[in-house]
Image (cartoon, rainbow, N blue to C red):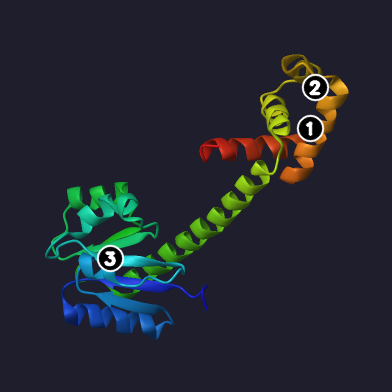
Amino acid sequence: MADDPIIHVIDDDESLRSALLSLLASVGFAGRGHASVSDFLAAERPDAPGCLVLDVRMPGMNGLDMQDRFDELGIAQPAVLMSGHGDIPMSVRAMKAGAVDFLVKPFRDQDLLDAVTAAVAQDRKRRAQAVDDAELRRRHASLSPREQQVMALVVAGQMNKQAAYALDLSEVTVKIHRGAAMRKMGARTLPDLVRMAERLALLGQ
């Protein structure tokens, strides 16, 4: 199923990669192994929730550099980083860049499973938010230009009378546009509409 998570293990150590994939499979996680960042980038990646289990030290692009380029590479899934030579600056850099966890080898199996479980939950939440954001954009785009203008003034705190004056409309017409905007946006109350407008602003709308 598309909703079944897939865990991508990226590590040049074949024996460790296989061991981690077996561990993940033992608790029901589907895993895919990659010997390098370039192998991962070249592989087919199904549209499914999941995360990356990413070694820091590898030939070619290392794990920390890859994490820094997630946006550029079009990677939205969270990462769990691991290293046999971890230090505090390295772990701080990884966590600041959004890593769910930084594990120093050798680590306990349960520590990895806990980190992966948390990362998958985070990715599910991200994907659900992306669906909600797309629907919010769609609803906003369904408003007429005038309805968008009225919505912008109303959520900014202007009364119908003030919005009518600003747009050179009658107050009745503003009320009609306001009602249409709330209906199309799916807002039951003005605070609902304000929260939607705030989210749209965050999305650059």
- In the image, what residue type sits under mark 2? Asn
Of the pair 48 and 123, the residue shown nearer to us? 48
Q: Residue at x 72, y 28 (%)?
A: 150
Q: Which residue is mark 2?
A: 160
Of the pair 8 and 46, the residue shown nearer to us? 46
Label ID, residue 41: 3
The answer to whether residue 30 shows anywhere in this view is yes
State which quadrant residue 192 falls in: top right
Label ID, residue 47: none
Residue 92: % across, % down? 25, 48
Q: Does the CB distance between marks 1 and 2 fall below 8 Å? A: yes
Residue 122: % across, % down? 46, 59
Q: Residue at x 25, y 82 (%)?
A: 19
Label ID, residue 178: 1
Q: Is residue 55 left or right of residue 148?
A: left
Tell which circle, 3 or 2, labels the residue nearer the N-terminal end.
Answer: 3
